Image (tube, rainbow, N blue to C red):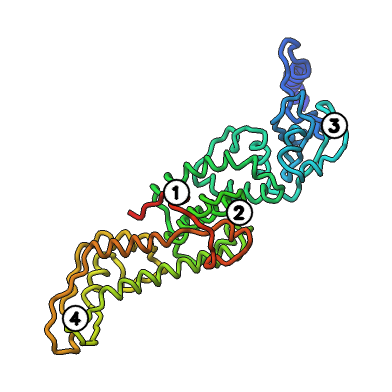
């Protein structure tokens, strides 16, 4: 045992020397100071040698003018400027009140009930910095983030300051999202989130555009929208309006084609009309659907319109078996199908933001939306 003790003494002296070196850092080297070091959240090791977690703090205002510290629900902090908060929202102004504050002794306000990331975006936006900070963004990420931002902005009535930056991102997504291939679930989620953002931030053209995309490209029930992240604030009138417009377009398309493909006897005075069996057979083959009318649970209106605009002329044959008159074969031309598709597409105008904000029925909307109001969204 004496031999073991003697063998351990050199090791103890080496460890003691290492501790002494760490305890006396070089005076010429500046030690890093945590950004959020404060009396309440010190970066110094606590008693027992356990270091407390460092609180994240972001500076949106410089240290000479940042007189407000915003504390978020995740514990992070944002140093802001009271003058900006006053101008951005009357609710912020009321929260700040007349309390004394300065850059050396900032006033602390807490937001414990709000999404911290959405509130950070809001604060960055009203301080005229990038909404997504330095991390950048993608169109899929922007959808959920802007929907959450819109909900927070509507709560604090600060959407006027955020609208230009958010609108620029959403306008870029209009073309990009139309060129990428989305699954049925992604279509519902992304377009619903962009619709919610446009609704909360007060963007009528974008709200109309994205609700139109939902009508043309979604197959699921629109009641599922309210469980999507950031979309719970959409009123019931929006959900009902989407269902109503989609059902109306489906019915109009099928009824118009049925009327054009029914064969009426060409003999004057003969009342016989007979549907053509040639069109359903041709449509199911060219449109890759199991039957006609198609199953709407797996077929979008846009897909159907795009297919019908490229079917070519369809020979309906002699479709009058119930009378004895001689009739010429009927043909429904590609031009006629194109006119039908364009008529249906023109009726898919999306929803009206004014009616949605008033929680009114969309089918009774009388607000005029001219051609320049609509953002381009080709069905071909």
Residue at 72% from the left image edge and 21% from the top image edge: 32
Horizontal side of residue 241 vs 44, given as left or right: left
Q: Residue furthest front?
A: 268
Q: Nearer the viewer, mark 3 or mark 1?
A: 1
Q: Are marks 4 and 1 in contact (CB under 8 Å)?
A: no
**Mark toward the start of the polypeptide (4 vs 3):** 3
Could you say where residue 113 lies in the image, as x and y percent from the top left? 74, 50
State how far apart marks 4 and 3 are (Cα).
86 Å
Q: Nearer the viewer, mark 4 or mark 1?
A: 1
Secondary structure state at the residue bearing disc 2: loop
State how far apart marks 4 and 1 are (Cα).
44 Å
State how far apart marks 2 and 4 are (Cα).
53 Å
Q: Which residue is mark 4?
A: 319
Q: Which residue is mark 3?
A: 101
**Mark toward the start of the polypeptide (2 vs 3):** 3
Secondary structure state at the residue bearing disc 3: loop
The numbered disc on residue 372 is 1
Say whether residue 223 is visible: no
**Mark toward the start of the polypeptide (3 vs 1):** 3
Secondary structure state at the residue bearing disc 4: loop
Q: Which residue is mark 2?
A: 230
The quarter of the rendered structure image containing the N terminus is top right
Could you say where residue 362 lies in the image, as x and y percent from the top left? 54, 65
Q: Dot 3: few (<14), some (14–19), or many (≥20) neighbours within 10 Å?
A: some
State how far apart marks 2 and 3 are (Cα).
34 Å
In the rendered image, the vertical position of residue 344 relative to residue 69, given as above or below: below
Q: Quadrant location of residue 47?
A: top right
**Mark toward the start of the polypeptide (2 vs 4):** 2
């Amino acid at each position: 045992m004496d031999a073991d003790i003697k063998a351990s003494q050199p090791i103890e002296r080496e460890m003691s020397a290492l501790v002494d070196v760490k305890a006396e850092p070089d005076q010429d080297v500046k030690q890093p100071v945590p950004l959020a070091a404060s009396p309440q959240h010190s970066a110094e090791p606590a008693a027992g040698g356990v270091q407390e977690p460092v609180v994240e703090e972001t500076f949106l205002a410089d240290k000479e003018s940042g007189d407000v510290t915003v504390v978020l629900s995740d514990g992070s902090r944002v140093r802001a400027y009271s003058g900006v908060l006053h101008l951005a929202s009357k609710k912020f102004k009321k929260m700040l009140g007349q309390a004394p504050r300065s850059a050396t002794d900032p006033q602390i306000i807490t937001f414990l009930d709000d999404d911290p990331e959405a509130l950070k975006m809001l604060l960055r936006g009203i301080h005229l910095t990038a909404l997504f900070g330095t991390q950048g963004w993608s169109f899929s990420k922007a959808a959920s983030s802007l929907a959450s931002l819109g909900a927070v902005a509507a709560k604090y009535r600060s959407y006027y300051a955020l609208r230009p930056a958010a609108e620029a991102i959403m306008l870029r997504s209009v073309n990009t999202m139309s060129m990428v291939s989305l699954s049925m679930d992604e279509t519902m989620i992304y377009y619903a989130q962009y619709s919610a953002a446009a609704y909360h931030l007060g963007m009528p053209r974008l709200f109309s555009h994205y609700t139109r995309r939902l009508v043309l490209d979604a197959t699921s029930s629109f009641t599922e929208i309210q469980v999507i992240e950031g979309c719970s604030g959409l009123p019931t009138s929006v959900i009902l309006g989407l269902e109503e417009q989609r059902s109306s377009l489906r019915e109009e398309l099928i009824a118009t084609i049925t009327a054009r493909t029914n064969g009426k006897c060409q003999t004057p005075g003969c009342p016989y009309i007979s549907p053509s069996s040639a069109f359903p057979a041709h449509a199911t083959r060219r449109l890759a659907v199991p039957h006609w009318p198609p199953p709407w649970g797996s077929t979008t209106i846009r897909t159907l319109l795009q297919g019908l605009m490229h079917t070519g002329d369809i020979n309906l044959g002699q479709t009058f078996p119930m009378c004895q008159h001689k009739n010429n074969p009927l043909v429904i031309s590609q031009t006629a199908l194109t006119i039908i598709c364009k008529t249906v597409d023109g009726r898919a105008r999306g929803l009206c933001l004014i009616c949605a904000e008033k929680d009114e029925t969309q089918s009774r909307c009388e607000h005029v939306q001219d051609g320049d109001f609509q953002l381009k969204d080709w069905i071909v």
